[in-house]
Image (cartoon, helix red, strand yellow):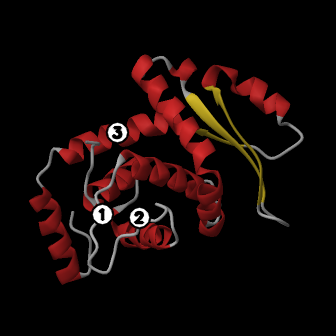
């Protein structure tokens, strides 16, 4: 049976990963909800009384999506990229996860880096989805120098995400429920 977690714990791990200030969590939550309704998780769409147990595939999709949001890519482009190219992206994410299992966190040379080349002005097209290791990023940049290139160190981001999720997963669900009830009463996130 695969590891699963709740929305509250997944959200909290992503908030910590990206250093979202407490007063910005509602905006983050709204953006995350819009991505989910837009199909971030494929056919798995929570809401209207339907609770979703979040799996590693969901974690990976969310981590990639929010890395792309941090880079300024529009949610619609992200949703289409994930819908049309998730098989390729997922393979790169799994390569990053395996690198994290094989190498210590101090061995950053083997970090897997996602390399995307996108054309967003006229066609919202994906020109290339590749990966490299951190020690070979220079070669990738030289190969792609005639184009735009977005680099994301997936190994590093996944290490941080898992560290946050591990801490949060050990906390009782009741703490998250109490915080959510307090937020609903006051309209402000609990600290």
Gap between marks 2 and 1 measured at Cα: 7 Å
- Depth check, mark 1 against mark 3: the one in front is 1
The residue tagged 1 is: 52
Mark 1 vs 3, N-terminal side: 1
Image vertical order of residue 114 relative to residue 85, above or below? above
Classify residue 78 as left or right of residue 177.
right
- Tell me residue 152's x, y (percent): 60, 40
**Secondary structure type for disc 3:** helix
Classify residue 96 as left or right of residue 20.
right
CB under 8 Å between discs 1 and 3? no
- The answer to which of 23 and 184 lies nearer the viewer is 184
Residue drawn at x 43%, y 18% is 102
Image vertical order of residue 110 relative to residue 161, above or below? above
**Secondary structure type for disc 1:** loop
Mark 2 vs 1, N-terminal side: 2
CB under 8 Å between discs 2 and 3? no
Residue drawn at x 31%, y 43% is 164
Image vertical order of residue 188 relative to residue 98, above or below? below
Mark 2 vs 3, N-terminal side: 2
CB under 8 Å between discs 2 and 1? yes
| Quarter occupied by the C terminus | bottom left
- Tell me residue 153's x, y (percent): 56, 36
The residue tagged 2 is: 44
- The answer to which of 16 and 122 lies nearer the viewer is 122
Q: Quadrant of residue 92?
A: top right
Gap between marks 2 and 3 measured at Cα: 22 Å
Residue drawn at x 78%, y 61% is 120
| Quarter occupied by the N terminus | top left
**Secondary structure type for disc 2:** loop
The residue tagged 3 is: 162
- Tell me residue 129's x, y (percent): 70, 42
């Amino acid at each position: 049976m695969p590891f699963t977690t709740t929305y509250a714990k997944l959200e909290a791990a992503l908030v910590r990963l990206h250093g979202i200030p407490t007063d910005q969590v509602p905006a983050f939550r709204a953006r995350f909800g819009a991505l989910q309704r837009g199909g971030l998780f494929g056919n798995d769409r929570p809401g209207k009384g339907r609770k979703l147990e979040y799996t590693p595939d969901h974690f990976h999709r969310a981590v990639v999506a929010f890395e792309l949001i941090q880079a300024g890519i529009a949610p619609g482009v992200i949703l289409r990229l994930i819908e049309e190219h998730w098989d390729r992206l997922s393979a790169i994410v799994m390569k990053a996860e395996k690198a994290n299992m094989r190498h210590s966190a101090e061995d950053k040379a083997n970090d897997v880096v996602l390399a995307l080349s996108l054309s967003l002005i006229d066609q919202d097209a994906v020109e290339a989805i590749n990966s490299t290791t951190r020690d070979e990023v220079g070669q990738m940049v030289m190969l792609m120098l005639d184009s735009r290139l977005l680099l994301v160190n997936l190994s590093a981001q996944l290490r941080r995400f898992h560290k946050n999720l591990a801490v949060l997963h050990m906390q009782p669900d009741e703490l998250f429920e109490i915080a959510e009830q307090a937020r609903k009463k006051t309209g402000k996130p609990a600290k």
